[in-house]
Amino acid sequence: MISEPRVSVAIPTFNGMPYLAEAIDSIRRQTYPGIDLFVVDGGSTDGTLDWLKDQSIDYVSLPPGTPVAHTWTAATERTRGDLVTLMCQDDLLYPTAIAVQVHNLQQSRGAIASVAQRDVIDAGGHVVKRSRGLAGITAPEIDGSALIRQCFRKGTNVVGEPHVVLFRREALLEHMPWDGTIPYLLDLGTYQAVFDNPGARVAIHREPIGAFRVSSASWSTRLVDQQLKQMRTWQRNFSDTHEVSRREALESSLSTWGQAQARKAFYRMLRLRKRWTSA
């Protein structure tokens, strides 16, 4: 009988309360049995460490002021499972998430990771968008370089947040550390390092296995403008190192601008929604 692979779920945190408790509860509710959970904290001052102690949760505390990329790297390097996923402190996994991702990797032809869709929730946990991510990808498995090129063409991270990506540990560790050069694309930068290589394959699951939380702290036009600027920087870097057709270049430019406008409209909708529900 072949044993099931061990899965490490690592949560990098910084002032993660009050959502951290809900995130960890979603991991504890997983139907998959072989999960190691731990937290790497980057110097929280909001009671996170006291709460982790009270809950008897395995954690490591880094010095205050530790850069985000260093926290994520420390979390990754501390994993011991055959498979690894990292999860932001305010996101959620649905109960069968890990089981589904493990199954996808077991059924694949040597994929180094499995990627799924996710729902988008507001600060109160209400779903505001369903089945997001993997734009234009319908095949059950895709070449890793093609997946990253799709991010370039669509002007956004079509892969999604790290909690919907289950990596084979050795494939992820080979490309450490996490690169914080382009802060809002910390995850995409690492996806590119891992996936954009000859022979790399990624399993695709076109159903949501978790939720990405958009809090009120994100609802700013200024933030969208910063994200737009950083995506264009990433795209220029991609163009400098890859052969890009004129059509792809035009599509990427228009898509990036369109994504920014859609994000601004979404944030306006969230502000109005909050006003209506609190009235």
Image (cartoon, rainbow, N blue to C red):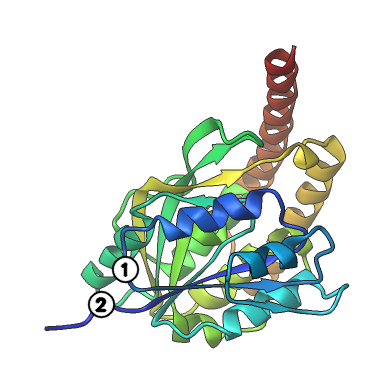
Give the numbered dot on residue 248: none
Q: Which residue is found at the position 55% from the left and 62% from the top?
A: 162
- Horizontal and vertical percent position of residue 120: 55, 39
Residue lying farthest to the left in this orientation: 1
- Horizontal and vertical percent position of residue 271: 75, 24
Is 186 placed above or below 277 here? below
Q: Which residue is found at the position 22% from the left and 68% from the top?
A: 107
- Mark closer to the observer (2, 1): 1
Residue placed under numbered mark 1 in the picture: 33
Residue lying farthest to the front in this orientation: 54
Q: Which residue is found at the position 77% from the left and 59% from the top?
A: 15
Is 138 placed above or below 11 here? above
Q: Residues within 10 Å of mark 2 (few under 14, many from 20)?
A: few
Q: Residues within 10 Å of mark 1 (few under 14, many from 20)?
A: some
Residue placed under numbered mark 2 in the picture: 4
Three-letter residue code for mark 1 = Pro
| Image quadrant in which the C terminus is located | top right
- The residues bearing labels 2 and 1 have C-alpha atoms spaced at a distance of 9 Å
Task: Give the side of residue 70 with respect to residue 31, left or right.
Answer: right
Proximity of marks 2 and 1: CB atoms separated by less than 8 Å = yes
- Horizontal and vertical percent position of residue 204: 35, 57
Secondary element type, mark 2: loop
Task: Give the side of residue 212 with respect to residue 46, left or right.
Answer: left
Three-letter residue code for mark 2 = Glu
Q: In which quarter of the image is residue 74?
A: bottom right
Secondary element type, mark 1: loop
